[in-house]
């Protein structure tokens, strides 16, 4: 997996999560989304305006 960010974020070093836990239902949904939209990326927002919601995007979006 390429973890190189597409654009810089100041002096903040990018970090990746080595392990994620998902239920079988979540894995099934992820497979359906990946089939429909290609590679995906997930982002857990830090709160404020996003409300700490997990988000799913097409990779690189």
Image: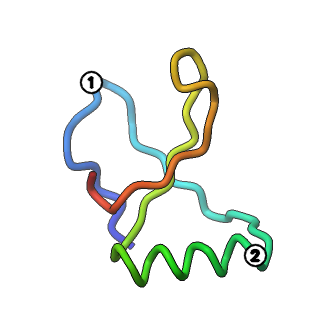
Residue 3, relative to residue 30: is it above or below?
A: above
Point out residue 53 in the picture as x, y percentages from the top left corner.
Answer: 62, 37
Identify the residue position indicated by label 2 in the image. Answer: 25
- Tell me the CA gap for discs 2 and 1: 37 Å
Q: Nearer the viewer, residue 56 or 11?
A: 56
Identify the residue position indicated by label 1 in the image. Answer: 10
Q: Residues within 10 Å of mark 1 (few under 14, many from 20)?
A: few
* Residue 39 placement: quadrant: bottom left
Q: Residue at x 48, y 54 (%)?
A: 56
Point out residue 28 in the picture as x, y percentages from the top left corner.
Answer: 65, 81
**Disc 1, SS:** loop
Whichever of labels 2 and 1 marks the residue nearer the N terminus, that label is 1
Using residue 60 as the reference point, say whether residue 19 is left or right of it: right
Residue 58, relative to residue 31: is it above or below?
A: above
Q: Residue at x 35, y 73 (%)?
A: 37
Q: Residue at x 52, y 17 (%)?
A: 49
Using residue 11 as the reference point, say whether residue 34 is left or right of it: right
Q: Quadrant of the N terminus?
A: bottom left
Residue 26, relative to residue 32: is it above or below?
A: above
């Amino acid at each position: 997996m390429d973890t190189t960010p597409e654009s810089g974020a100041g002096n903040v070093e990018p970090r990746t999560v080595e392990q994620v836990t998902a239920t079988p239902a979540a894995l099934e949904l992820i497979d359906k989304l990946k089939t429909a939209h290609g590679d995906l990326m997930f982002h857990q927002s830090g709160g404020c305006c996003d409300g700490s919601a997990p988000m799913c995007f097409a990779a690189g979006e």
